[in-house]
Image (cartoon, grey):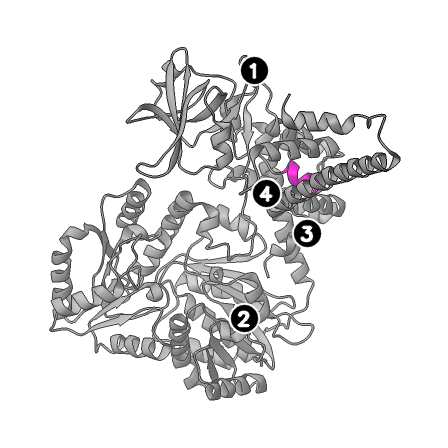
Amino acid sequence: MAAEDQNACAETLPPPAAATGSSRKKAAVKTAANQHDTKSTAKNNTSKASEKLARLGLRKDMDFALHLPMRYEDETVVTSMHDAGFRGGSNVQIEGVITESDVQYRPRRQLVVTIADDSGQVVLRFLNFYGSQIKQLAVGIRIRARGELRHGFLGAEMVHPTYKIVVEGAPLPTVLTPVYHSAEGVPQALLRKAISNALLRIQWRDTLSASRLAALGLQSFEASVRTLHNPPPDIDQHSLIEREHPAWERMKFDELLAQQLSLKRAQITRRSKGASALPIVGELSNAFLLNLPFSLTGAQEKVLAEIRADLREQFPMQRLLQGDVGSGKTIVAALAAAQAIDNGFQAAMMAPTEILAEQHFKKIATWLEPLGVKTAWLTGSLKKKEKDLANALISSGEAQLVIGTHALIQDSVQFKKLGLVIVDEQHRFGVSQRLNLANKAEAGKVPHQLMMSATPIPRTLAMTYFADLEVSVIDELPPGRTPIVTRVIDQNRREEVIARVHAATQEGKQVYWVCPLIEESETLQLQTATDTHAMLAAALPDIQVGLVHGRLKPAEKQAVMEDFIQHRSQLLVATTVIEVGVDVPNASLMVIEHAERFGLSQLHQLRGRVGRGAAASACLLLYQGPLGGTARQRLAIMRESNDGFEIARKDLELRGPGEFLGARQSGEAMLRFANLDTDQWLVEKARNLACELLSNDPLTVAAHLERWLGNREEFLRV
């Protein structure tokens, strides 16, 4: 009998007959103490497990029910070692007895375990392991292991397989094994048990009626959840794994419906709040249009009419203005600001970077100040005296148009009569930042809001993530824009590229050379902006080479950019700080270093810095080979298309909505189950039902949102 078993038995035996009363009392106290310690330990373990599960967002029973498998493993079959050897590169399950187990130190510390059956053997290799695993995986122990089989120096092997200790003849599962998203210290076994227990406790009810489910062709909620956590033996495994099974369709629909309901409800809530109507299109607006040296495009006129109609309403405008690079969004925004000023209100424009904010300020001030509009400029880099002056102009109402960065949302900034908020590159701001600016209107009023994005958003994505917004699209470029020719070039041809840069500057043109990093990185080993600047300055001594990056002080950045704008420098080496807002019509050539490291949207934004004048323009994408599949796709798309909407659609396919929208800055909860590429038909159905429920069935709306969002509905757009 094991020592711990002997002790356990001894504690339950009665004391010897000769024992004194005192000794009996001591024994009883000791037994009670041990029992208390056991209960205390169990309680602590349960508490720790609960804390770890809570970090995954699993607190209520319904949280566990909706923590659906991210994939499934087929543990219903054991493959012999001999047959497994012919299946290199695939996931298999094997079973055998450990014949060797030891810690090796070449080339690094690792636990190497050999298991064998009657047909052969396989090596299991663990590069990260605990001391307890060495004891678990001892010679003579029978285990089942599952993982990707590959062929190493010692024959067939698995690296970091999942495994469990079994007895000979132990039955195999009859269904697929769910695998859940987890975290450190939360094993799959714990998750499976917690989910199973939660499913037993839930009082099941469907948020959608049987008639609605029949009309939509959906199955019940309970049946769907149970199927996904415990798929029956006869299930179509392909449809389950590919998330095409009716159980998955129900989950996707419910998730999309919750999103549509929450966003539409946010829209209704905002519309119930008062906003100051801005009906007058007066002297300033008319003079602005008359003084423009060009005519608006048809697309600009269309979206301007939509915005003007919104501004006339007594509920706040909430409109997203999107358009490709160079489509003329800034002019439309300036005309919206002019309408606010015509009605005696202030307008504020916020941009994510100082360079972009400054470009807007210089351009819009040039248009409006000659017409008598007082403008103010506010950024974090201003000196205290300058900030105090700007704040005084804003609070007194003397400044009719205010342009700046995040500095606009500081507590010290107080508007006298804010009627319109314009947010450029809106996806770069968090929800709370946009809310802080909107809250600077008069008490009890909400300002009209116009958000702009130069990253066109595909229709299905807009329907899903921007369901609470009205969307305007400028789908036409101003006349006279020449298409940008894009070439993909191996960095080994760098000398040819430098020669082309020199030739362009000798013709009086200007050039951007974009680099992704500022200083050396051992992991990425990319050419840096500072090194590239030094190299180009040495290679091209007869031209002026500027350098701008995010770590320069604002005054230094401004000086470098001014030199380039005024043609005092011909070549500008830059990081992605020039991605948006920089407008130098004479710049007609761009070189992007290590283009394979950039995303599609960013490449398109950068390329948009050229092609703004009459001269033919080109963008050279320098890449470091060999290229991975995704990088190759991105560069091919850039070479083949200048259409921002087509590029955005391809970008969504490659990256998915979470990354496409940018670092989750949008404030929306990303979809866990629905795939906008394959589930567009569900988006339309969810959208239609959301409108119907909000009009006719508030109880169902509340129940559905409670189930899917709980108290997390704070992600609603502001």
Circle on res. 421: 2
Q: Nearer the viewer, residue 527 or 213?
A: 527
Residue that label 1 marks: 170
- Tell me if mark 1 has few (under 14), some (14-19) or many (20+) residues whose alpha carbon lies within 10 angstroms of its own: few
Residue occupying the point 57% across, 71% down: 437
Q: Indicate the amino acid at tag 3.
A: Asn
Residue that label 4 marks: 256
Residue that label 3 marks: 711
Q: Indicate the amino acid at tag 1.
A: Ala
- Tell me if mark 2 has few (under 14), some (14-19) or many (20+) residues whose alpha carbon lies within 10 angstroms of its own: many
**In the image, residue 133 above or below residue 626:** above
Q: Nearer the viewer, mark 3 or mark 4?
A: 3
Quick check: marks 1 and 4 in contact, CB under 8 Å? no
Residue furthest to the right? 21
Q: Indicate the amino acid at tag 2.
A: Val
Quick check: marks 3 and 2 in contact, CB under 8 Å? no
Q: Quadrant of residue 65?
A: top right
Q: CA distance from mark 3 to mark 1?
A: 45 Å
Q: Nearer the viewer, residue 14 or 706?
A: 14
In what element is the residue under mark 2? Answer: strand
Residue occupying the point 34% across, 18% down: 85
Residue occupying the point 38% across, 74% down: 359
Which region is colored magenta? Answer: 57-66
Q: Quadrant of residue 526?
A: bottom left
Q: CA distance from mark 1 to mark 2?
A: 67 Å
